[in-house]
Amino acid sequence: MSPLVATPDPPYYAVIFTSIRNDGDAEAYAKTAQRMLELAAQQPGFLGVESVSDPSGTGLTVSYWSDLDSIQKWHALAEHREAQRLGKEKWYAQFQLRVCCVEREYGWQQQDDKNRKQP
């Protein structure tokens, strides 16, 4: 299974969340982040998410959505609002959020499995 989201034909939307973590409670952060992924997946219009982070605490998460209304409803969801509050209060030194319309996409995948890196 690919870690890349299989998105529909454009247009659709991407929410890009770039963050720098502080030294706040890593266990509580991980638990909340997992819950937010589960909750987002239940929302109408959610298409998927891709996320990476490095040991220094810099992270990049891109969630994909079918429309702006779905993004606004996700942003306003009470449990998500609480996680946002905790992020500002406890877990992030800095973050930036960008909402983009994906107008075009293309990709490529190597077909030879023996040359693929194993996770």
Image (tube, rainbow, N blue to C red):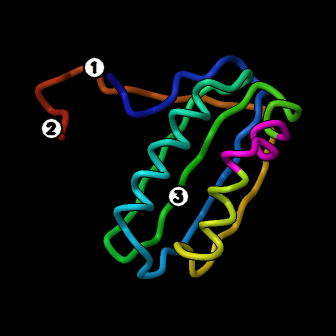
Residue at point 51%, 29% (across, down): 5
What residue does disc 2 label? Answer: 118
Label 1's element? loop
Q: Which mark is nearer the camera, 2 or 3?
A: 3
On the image, which quarter does residue 112 sit in? top left
**Of the residues under marks 2 and 3, which one precedes in the sequence?**
3
**Of the residues under marks 1 and 2, which one precedes in the sequence?**
1
Quadrant into which the C terminus falls? top left
Identify the magenta region: 72-80
Residue 73 counted in the magenta span: yes
Residue at point 41%, 61% (across, down): 28
Q: Which of 109/8 is in front?
A: 8
Q: Position of residue 66 (x, y in %)?
A: 76, 25
What residue does disc 1 label? Answer: 111
On the image, which quarter does residue 104 sit in? top right
Residue at point 68%, 26% (across, down): 43
Q: Given the image, on which type of amino acid does mark 2 rest?
A: Gln
| 3 and 1 marks in contact (CB < 8 Å) | no
The dot on residue 60 is 3
Q: Gap between marks 3 and 1, in whole Å?
A: 27 Å
95 displayed left or right of 78 = left
In the picture shown, does residue 24 fall above or below 27? Answer: below
On the image, which quarter does residue 73 sit in? top right
Q: Position of residue 75 (x, y in %)?
A: 78, 46
Q: Residues within 10 Å of mark 3 (few under 14, many from 20)?
A: some
Q: Gap between marks 1 and 2, in whole Å?
A: 14 Å
Q: Which of 3/87 is in front?
A: 87
Q: Which of 92/98 is in front?
A: 92
Q: Gap between marks 2 and 3, in whole Å?
A: 22 Å
